[in-house]
Amino acid sequence: MGLNIQFFNIIRNEVERALGKTKSSPMSRYQSAKKAYQTQRGIRRTLRDSLFLVTGVLSAGFGLKGFLIPNGFIDGGVMGISLLTNIETGFSLAALIILINLPFILLGWKQISPTFGLKSIVAISLLAFVVVVIPYPVITNDKLLISVFGGFFLGAGIGLTIRGGGVIDGTEILAIYLNRKSSLSVGDFILLFNIVIFFVAAYLLTIETALYSILIYLAASKTVDFILEGIEEFTGVTIISARNQEIANMIRQKLRWGLTIYSGKRGYGKSGENYPTEIIFTVTTRLEISRLNSEIEKIDPNAFIVMQSIKDTRGGMLKKRPLK
């Protein structure tokens, strides 16, 4: 009889499992919830990146067809080479954008990641499509306005595309690669690369066109910086004080910021004397540095403070940038 009951229970469990009625364990439910959350986050991230890529491509296309191309101006980087080649040879700009960028994208695929390479291929192909298909209106013939706003929309397109995880100009990929192979920094290489382009533009076109193109490049690069870093550039602040506990409480309770406290040793004087101390580290925006200094001054005017610029942050008790 007992054997029959045991056999019956086995059959019942198998049927319930087949019908999805078996109660899962807490760990199983946790794993399922975690997997669903990760899937949802992945979908949101993909949608966000796609929006950045599409918006960036449309903005860059507007900068090109609404300002630069009708007036024979160029930009720096690979885009500048494409525009200059198009002006001199009449070869299709859309084809040039793809062909000249392709070696850099393959380099990025290998050096950075296949996902980055795939997104960049999609973005560049979309830009070529937009340049051919969308009839953007010509906004102005004023050279100064072309330089400022053409650079702005082109830079916005480049910045938004980078935010989406790809590029539409492969110059920085080559710069990062060469930085690993030589003593030149990424910024140094990009500067030298663009100097060569603008010298060639001055020779093939006119000096005036080259000078206006430099303005376009400057406007574009500043716009890229703004989109990637935002107006609230972050600053890391290290504070060493004999009254560190009071300063830490002020940051937590009054300013309501996150902070980290780690151990160190203070040392000064001819004797090299040192003793343990606690070091405070917090991150804030440059707009709030003055307030922090003022509050520290009230507690300890002799506090030692070190500040350094931070390009980006993630996690913790910190406000996110609008485009993050």
Image: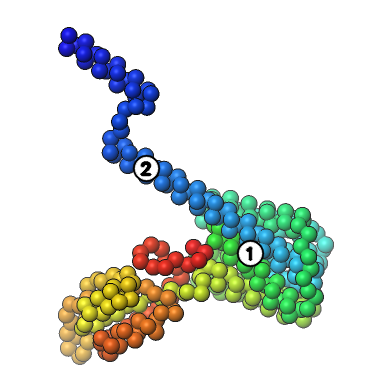
Query: Under tag 1, what secondary structure?
Result: helix
- The answer to whether residue 125 is above or below residue 228 is above
Q: Are marks 2 and 1 in contact (CB under 8 Å)?
A: no
Q: Is residue 308 visible?
A: yes
- The answer to whether residue 3 is above or below residue 182 is above
Q: Quadrant of residue 6?
A: top left
**Image-based side of 83 in relation to 9, left or right:** right
Residue 176 drawn at (x, y percent): 53, 64
The residue at 63%/56% (across/down) is: 54
The amino acid pointed to by label 1 is Gly
Disc sitting over residue 33 in the figure: 2
Residue 78 drawn at (x, y percent): 67, 64
In the depicted view, which residue is nearer to us: 50 or 255? 255
The residue at 63%/51% (across/down) is: 122
The residue at 33%/23% (across/down) is: 16
Query: Under tag 2, what secondary structure?
Result: helix
Residue position marked by numbered label 1 in the rendering: 157
**Image-based side of 11 in relation to 44, left or right:** left
- The answer to whether residue 310 is above or below residue 168 is below
The span from disc 2 to disc 1 (Cα, nearest Å) is: 37 Å
Q: Earlier in the sequence, mark 2 or mark 1?
A: 2
For the N terminus, give its image quadrant: top left
The amino acid pointed to by label 2 is Ala
**Image-based side of 56 in relation to 18, left or right:** right
* Residue at the far right in the pictured view: 90
**Image-based side of 81 in relation to 44, left or right:** right
- The answer to whether residue 262 is above or below residue 242 is above
The residue at 24%/83% (across/down) is: 241
